[in-house]
Image: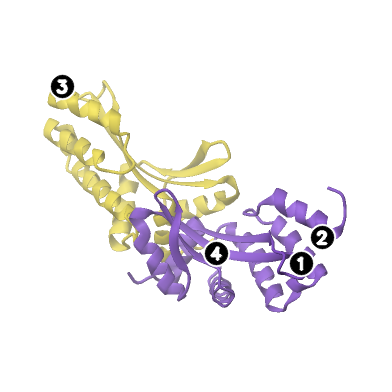
Chain colours: A purple, B yellow
Amino acid sequence: MELHPKWVVGFVDGEGCFYVGVNKNEAMSLGYQVLPEFRVVQHRRDIQVLYALKRFFGCGTVRRNHEDRYELRIRKFECLKKVVEFFQNHPLKTKKNVDFKKFSKIIKMMDEGKHLTREGLIEIVQIALEMNTGKHEQLKQILCELTGKAG
Amino acid sequence: MELHPKWVVGFVDGEGCFYVGVNKNEAMSLGYQVLPEFRVVQHRRDIQVLYALKRFFGCGTVRRNHEDRYELRIRKFECLKKVVEFFQNHPLKTKKNVDFKKFSKIIKMMDEGKHLTREGLIEIVQIALEMNTGKHEQLKQILCELTGKAG
């Protein structure tokens, strides 16, 4: 299945998700790891579309999401940079583009190593909090811990 | 907002719905009315995309679907013929294309007036029963009544 870039934009406008998780991780100097990911979820009957998207972006993993739903998930940082570049050149039409811009700002900050500084990490958590897809309560808790303010 | 045909295909692959309802209607000679429709549902924040699709197809109505969700709904028969022509020229990539082909067959049969004969109506209900989007229990009941068989 050959995918046209504009089809990919339309499909991701409907089905794609830009997500930035921040997890506790004692191995990181600040105690937290930033985990951006791009996901497309489909019913099993359309798993071949997920594989076509994987070929299109040249990266990612097709895996089970939940019950009869499967996902293409892209987490590798170099791959996410390619995904960001694609959607910068082929803008989304829906309000998902607002989330995408925040996502791409976080990718840029991580590329510059800013997530390794307290100020940078705080800014990333604040941007993730403004996204539609974030786990907001968890992010607020992390922000409290990083800034030392009470909830 | 200008929409590219391939974007429309990708978006409808994700968000579109081809649906054929069959309702009791005493005004019809066979007692049933076939009501095909094409729908795209979006959160209110992306209502402008629904209006862009309405302009793209040159028809349809943007209306509230449920709570903060809105839909573009196309029901006019002449408009549905245009929608069918578009997706015949620009095929869907997902399994939604299977439903679309059944939908387009029903549109063709209606265009030939076959829904006004008992045999044609029975065939339409049978095709609608094979679609993912149908109200199956209701359609089975109608099929029983039309064919005079017990459930």
Find disc 4 in the rendering and name its residue.
Answer: A38
Q: Which chain carries label 2?
A: A
Find disc 2 in the rendering and name its residue.
Answer: A146
Q: How far apart are marks 4 and 2 (CA)?
A: 26 Å
Q: Which residue is drawn at 48% across and 65% down?
A: A9
Image quarter of the N terminus of chain B: bottom right
Query: Quick one: label 1, few (<14), some, or many (20+) residues within 10 Å?
Result: many
- Judge whether B112 appears above or below B118 on screen: below
Name the image quarter holding residue A24.
bottom right
What type is the residue that disc 3 sits on? Answer: Ala
Mark 2: secondary structure? helix
In the rendered image, residue B42, in percent from the top left (x then y), is placed at 52, 47
- Mark 1 or mark 4: name the one nearer the start of the chain: 4
Q: Which one is closest to the eye, mark 4 or mark 2?
A: 2
In the rendered image, residue A34, in percent from the top left (x then y), is placed at 67, 66
Q: Distance between the residues labelled 2 and 3?
A: 69 Å
Find disc 1 in the rendering and name its residue.
Answer: A121
Q: Is residue B85 left or right of residue B10?
A: left
- Judge whether B5 appears above or below B75 on screen: below
Q: Residue at x 56, y 68 (%)?
A: A75
Mark 4: secondary structure? strand
- Mark 2 or mark 1: name the one nearer the start of the chain: 1
Q: How far apart are marks 3 and 1 (CA)?
A: 67 Å
